Image (tube, rainbow, N blue to C red):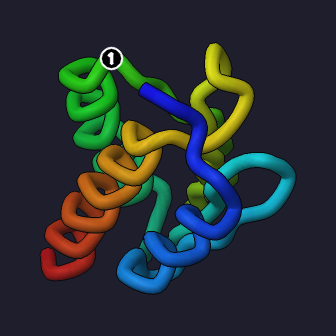
Amino acid sequence: MKKLTEFEISNKLEKLVDWEYYDNALHTDFEFDNFKDCMSAMNRIAFECEALNHHPEWTNIYNTLEIKLTTHDKDGVTELDFKLATAINKIVEVEEED
């Protein structure tokens, strides 16, 4: 898997809601109703991360989840980061409907 160019990343970001590219990574944050909902989403995301064998840098403070995606062994963003970001968006949307 190759590192994507900034042009490729910019084009892909047009189809990825609420994600930004800076500091050589994809970034987003989500705010949930409470801590329990945030942790539930993190647990569901963790299963997807394991399935893809790709793991985010993330932090959680009460009901807020901040996520950073980059492919460390490629020193930048790859298709795998976009695949995980897309899966995360689907998981969080399902979580928000509850």
Which residue is identified by label 1? 53
Sort mark 1 into few (<14), some (14-19) or many (20+) by Cα contacts within 10 Å.
Answer: few
Is residue 51 in sight in this rendering? yes
> Which quadrant would residue 28 be assigned to in this image?
bottom right
In the displayed structure image, the side of residue 19 where residue 94 appears, left or right: left
Residue 88 position in % (x across, y down): 32, 55
> Where 21 falls versus 33 (above or below)?
above
Would you say 74 lies left or right of 55 here? right
Q: State the residue at coordinates (40%, 75%).
A: 16
Quarter placement of the C terminus: bottom left
**84 is higher (above) or lower (below) than 20:** above
Q: Is residue 73 above or below residue 4?
A: above
Indicate left or right for 95 with 81 as reference: left
Frontmost residue, 72 versus 68: 72
Looking at this view, is 44 or 79 the one in front?
79
Residue that appears at 38% across and 37% down: 80
